[in-house]
Image (spheres, rainbow, N blue to C red):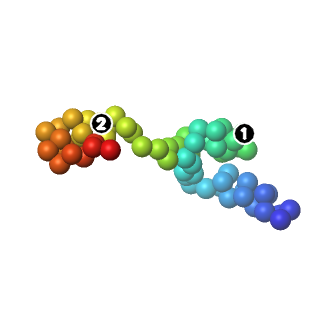
Amino acid sequence: MSQQRPRQNRCVTNAAHVITVVEEAKDRLVAKGVLPNKITVLPNTVDLDKFLAVAAQPTSRHWDVMAQ
């Protein structure tokens, strides 16, 4: 276990690109020496505005998509 963290640090600092799901993880990686432009944050969330826009369309109302 003691060798795992240095190995992880070496992997992320040498990676061509790193993907994370939260800004806090990006901040931690930058603190470890990963260049910010090598990190992409892809949030693990749902954009409710997109779903609400679909629900407002006549077809969605017809099929009662937002009934619950």
- x then y, percent, for residue 53: 26, 35
Which quadrant would the C terminus be assigned to in this image? top left
The residue carrying pointer 2 sits among few (fewer than 14), some (14 to 19) or many (20 or more) residues within 10 Å by Cα, namely few
Which amino acid type corresponds to the residue marked 1 in the rendered image?
A: Ala
Q: Residue at x 54, y 50 (%)?
A: 19
**Closer to us: mark 2 or mark 1?**
2
Which quadrant would the N terminus be assigned to in this image? bottom right
Q: Give the structural element (helix, strand or loop) at label 2.
A: helix
- Horizontally, residue 67 falls left or right of residue 38, namely left
> Which quadrant holds residue 54?
top left
Q: Give the structural element (helix, strand or loop) at label 1.
A: helix
Q: Which residue matches tag 1?
A: 31
- Horizontally, residue 17 falls left or right of residue 59, namely right
Q: Which residue matches tag 2?
A: 52
Which amino acid type corresponds to the residue marked 2 in the rendered image?
A: Leu
Residue toward you, 53 or 3: 53
Relative to residue 30, is residue 3 depicted above or below?
below
Mark 2 to mark 1: distance in Å?
38 Å
